[in-house]
């Protein structure tokens, strides 16, 4: 259904007289005033929620015109709320006190309902019915219910003494009555919530009369009405009581007449319990003096002095009440600790004295030794061999005792139900004594140490010299002898003797003090540029004296750490010297390793030989030629002979021009050439300079003999075939032209008499010799006049050397034709002339 458009209310508050206006609002429709209906019913709403008020039965058609008014509860004057006609709706001002009011199809909807909306709502409307408008009235009595608020509990006292009267009140700030209440009780340390039976738990006030310790705990009140129910936060009620009479418990539990007892060194726990709220404060008194505060008093390893009366005092600080209980504790104690057993050599290392000791206690402990295969005897038997109090000693023959035999000392005491025991096993340590020597700081003294740990009894050690004289006093397990370094210790030998009662013969170890002994290779070879490692190691017993090892170079200078040329690496018994980047021949020579201890000094030379790499094979240049631009050369070479190599180097320099100038130095044109390469193209050349090149083979740092020096050859003339072909063609054409010219001159003798005579005249006896050289030919030809061909001739041959015959018009002529002049015709008057014609063919 479409909601009507609301307009602001512009009129005043009006009452029932709005009926006067209804005919006008009907828009000319007839009214059936006599059929007016009036209805009244009740409605219930909840504050904060929504409620709808209908202006008639739900099945009826919505009114054409409707007017709603409201009369608050307890007042007589109605107030307009809303008026609507179809989609036109208008709201009266001040309706916000009722809630959010909307009018739709005659139904008044109140959202977010407020308590002020409780009262009488009147609806007056015109309802269309069979073509007429019927007047209808509806009165709605609206009741607004308020939900119950969260209750809270107020006890008469947060803490009350046991036996007093206590009440808890549940209070609700708002809520529509009638209200009902219920109570829940929970123990202080958790557990299920239960209703307190027989305490009036259905009212707003809970009576606890009289209160006892079971009433202590959390209380929750739940209030409810016809709208909802709410529970309060838990409230704690503390019932104060006690303390009751304390009860003392002793652990371990050993009651005696009039008290309790405990054994010495036992852990005794005294616990006191006196129920109280708040919990009791416990104070322990020993013989009337305070010794502890707390419920439990732990006596760790109780002693005899801690025996006596113990009183537990319980106090309730809230009620200021006290109770107490007392016990008597008796302490029985054995000797402190446990029995100790030892074995000592006696009678000059022939017997063993077994000693057992356990002093103190009350009564003193009873001790006796039990050996292997011996049965334990009853303590009550009189005359028991070896039995004594507090201390017991047994002498055992070493020769009659087997290695590994065990002996036990049994101790008994009234306070020890299981007794106590200690034992020892007689044994000889395996192996033999070990000897060592060490020098003190500054090599002022030499200390000889002999050790042979283990054994029962301990092994007795003594130092002697080779003559059998005793040096120093005997000592168990370890014997130390200190000697002064007076220069006489070198090569002397010392003996350490070890004696044990179970060993028939004494054992020994020997120690000789010697000058350090070095070990190193006599010679070390390395190629130049490499690293040479010179190793020096100590060997022998002298190393234990802490020898100082040093290296000296060939110039007898000590090598110290931090030098760039050398590197030192040192261990306990070795020192290595590394010579970096070995140079030939500067690093070759004798290096010396020295070792010095408190006895003397030793030196060992090591020769270092730095070798050069073998010479690489020789190189021969097989091809060296300029390119056309003369800025690059193409170089090829080959090697001769066997030899290792790592690359090639190409050098160049300018060839000297004047004789007095020295040649320029060689410069590297290409370096680091791979060893498998055999050619190289070199650029960056000046075309106006003549260069010389050579190639060298290189083996690491060693260069071979340079190749022969060569200058680049000129590039080949690439147009030679074309020029040759043109020259041959020119010669053929010139020959043909010459024959035609001779033939023409012979036929036209009268026309060309001079040429005819020149060509066909026979030389006389006084004629000149032919010209032998080209220079002579050029000179001879220079004096002759050039013959111009006459017009109309078929061709004119060239008469001068190097000149080309120009063809006549209309006649083909071959230029540059060289021909030998034939003999002149008989009867010629002119002298014969020998002419050599040189023809140069140009492409």
Image (cartoon, rainbow, N blue to C red):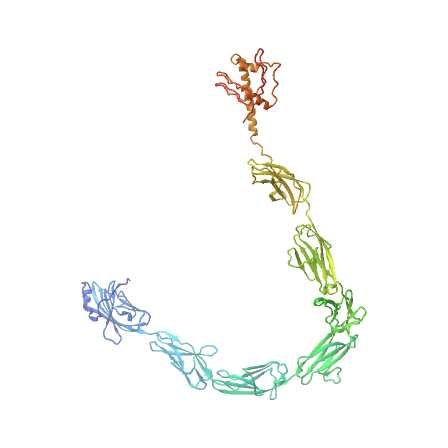
Q: Residue at x 73, y 83 (%)?
A: 388
Q: What is the x, y in percent for residue 505?
A: 80, 71
Instruction: Using the image as rendered, state which of residue 577 and residue 248 is in the foreground.
Output: 577
Q: Residue furthest top?
A: 827
Q: Position of residue 729 (x, y in %)?
A: 55, 24
Residue 653 vs 350, above or below: the answer is above
Would you say 435 lies left or right of 623 here?
right
- Residue 159 in picture, x, y percent from top left: 44, 83
The quadrant of the image that shows the N terminus is bottom left
Q: Is residue 153 visible?
A: yes
Residue 466 placement (x, y as % from top left): 80, 68
Which of the 4 quarters of the picture holds residue 21? Answer: bottom left
Along the viewing direction, whichever of 120 and 614 lies nearer the viewer: 614
Looking at this rendering, what residue extends furthest in the bottom direction? 258
Q: How many marks?
A: 0
Residue at (72, 68) in percent of width and height: 444
**Looking at the picture, does residue 166 appear above or below residue 445?**
below
Residue depicted at 66% across the width and 50% down the height: 529
From the viewer's side, name the closer residue of 379 and 670. Answer: 670
Name the quarter where the C terminus is drawn: top right
Horizontal side, residue 348 vs residue 81: left or right: right
Q: Is residue 404 visible?
A: no
């Amino acid at each position: 259904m479409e909601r009507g458009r609301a307009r602001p209310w512009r009129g005043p508050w009006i009452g029932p007289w709005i009926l006067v206006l209804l005919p006008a609002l009907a828009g000319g429709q007839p009214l059936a005033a006599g059929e007016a209906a009036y209805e009244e019913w009740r409605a219930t709403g909840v504050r904060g929620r929504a409620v709808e008020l209908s202006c008639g039965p739900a099945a009826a058609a919505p009114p054409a015109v409707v007017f709603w008014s409201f009369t608050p509860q307890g007042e007589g004057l109605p107030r307009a709320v809303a008026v609507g006609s179809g989609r036109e709706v208008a709201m009266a001002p001040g309706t916000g006190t009722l809630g959010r009011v909307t009018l739709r199809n005659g139904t008044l909807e109140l959202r977010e309902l407020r308590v002020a909306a409780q009262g009488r709502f009147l609806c007056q409307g015109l309802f269309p019915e069979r073509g007429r408008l019927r007047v209808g009235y509806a009165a709605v009595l609206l009741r607004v219910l308020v939900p119950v608020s969260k209750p809270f509990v107020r006890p008469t006292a947060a803490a009350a003494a046991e036996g007093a009267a206590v009440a808890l009140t549940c209070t609700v700030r708002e809520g529509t009555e009638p209200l009902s209440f219920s109570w829940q009780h929970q123990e202080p340390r958790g557990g299920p919530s239960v209703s307190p039976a027989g305490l009036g738990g259905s009212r707003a006030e809970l009576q606890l009369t009289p209160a006892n310790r079971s009433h202590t705990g959390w209380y929750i009140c739940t209030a409810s009405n016809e709208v909802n129910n709410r529970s309060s936060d838990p409230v704690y009620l503390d019932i104060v009581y006690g303390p009751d009479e304390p009860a003392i418990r002793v652990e371990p539990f050993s009651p005696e007449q009039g008290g309790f007892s405990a054994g010495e060194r036992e852990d005794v726990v005294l616990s006191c319990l006196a129920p109280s709220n708040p919990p009791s404060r416990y104070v322990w008194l020993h013989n009337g003096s305070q010794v502890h505060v707390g419920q439990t008093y732990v006596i760790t390893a109780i002693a005899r002095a801690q025996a006596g009366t113990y009183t537990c005092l319980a106090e309730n600080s809230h009620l200021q009440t006290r109770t107490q209980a007392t016990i008597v504790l008796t302490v029985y104690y054995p000797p402190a600790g446990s029995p100790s057993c030892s074995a000592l050599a006696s009678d000059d290392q022939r017997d063993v004295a077994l000693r057992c000791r356990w002093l103190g206690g009350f009564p003193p402990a009873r001790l006796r030794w039990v050996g292997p295969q011996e049965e334990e005897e009853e303590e009550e038997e009189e005359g028991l061999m070896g039995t004594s109090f507090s201390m017991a000693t047994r002498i055992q023959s070493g020769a009659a005792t087997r290695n590994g035999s065990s002996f036990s000392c049994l101790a008994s005491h009234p306070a020890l139900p299981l007794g106590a025991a200690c034992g020892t096993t007689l044994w000889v340590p395996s192996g033999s004594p070990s000897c060592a020597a060490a020098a003190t700081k500054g090599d002022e003294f030499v200390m000889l140490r002999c050790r042979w740990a283990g054994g029962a009894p301990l092994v007795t050690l003594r130092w002697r010299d080779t003559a059998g004289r005793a040096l120093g006093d005997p000592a168990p397990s370890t014997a130390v002898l200190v000697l002064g370094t007076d220069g006489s210790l070198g090569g002397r030998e010392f003996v350490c003797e070890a004696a044990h009662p179970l060993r028939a013969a004494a054992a020994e170890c020997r120690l000789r003090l010697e000058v350090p002994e070095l070990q190193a290779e006599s010679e070390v070879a390395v190629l130049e540029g490499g690293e040479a490692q010179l190793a020096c190691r100590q060997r022998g017993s002298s190393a234990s004296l802490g020898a100082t090892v040093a290296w000296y170079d060939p110039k007898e200078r000590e090598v110290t750490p931090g030098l760039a040329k050398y590197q030192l690496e040192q261990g306990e018994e070795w020192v290595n010297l590394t010579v970096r980047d070995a140079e030939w021949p500067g690093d070759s020579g004798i290096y010396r390793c020295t070792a010095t201890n408190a006895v003397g000094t030793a030196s060992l030379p090591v020769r270092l030989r730095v070798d050069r790499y073998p010479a690489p094979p020789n190189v021969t240049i097989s091809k060296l030629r300029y390119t056309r631009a003369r800025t690059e050369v193409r170089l090829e070479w080959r090697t001769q002979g066997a030899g290792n190599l790592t690359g090639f180097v190409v050098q160049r320099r300018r060839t000297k021009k004047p004789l007095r100038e020295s040649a320029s130095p060689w410069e590297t044109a290409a370096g680091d050439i791979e060893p498998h390469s055999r050619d190289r193209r070199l650029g960056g050349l000046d075309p106006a300079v003549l260069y010389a090149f050579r190639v060298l083979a290189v083996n690491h740092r060693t260069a071979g003999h340079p190749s022969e020096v060569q200058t680049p050859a000129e590039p080949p003339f690439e147009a030679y075939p074309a020029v040759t072909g043109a020259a041959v063609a020119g010669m053929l054409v010139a020959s043909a032209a010459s024959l035609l010219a001779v033939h023409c001159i012979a036929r036209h003798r009268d026309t060309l008499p001079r040429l005819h005579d020149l060509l066909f005249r026979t030389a006389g006896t006084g004629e000149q010799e032919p010209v032998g050289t080209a220079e002579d030919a050029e000179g001879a030809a220079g004096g002759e006049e050039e013959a111009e061909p006459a017009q109309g001739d078929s061709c004119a041959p060239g008469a001068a050397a190097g000149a080309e015959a120009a063809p006549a018009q209309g006649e083909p002529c071959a230029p540059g034709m060289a021909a030998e002049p034939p003999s002149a015709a008989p009867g010629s008057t002119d002298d014969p002339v020998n002419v050599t014609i040189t023809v140069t063919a140009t492409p």
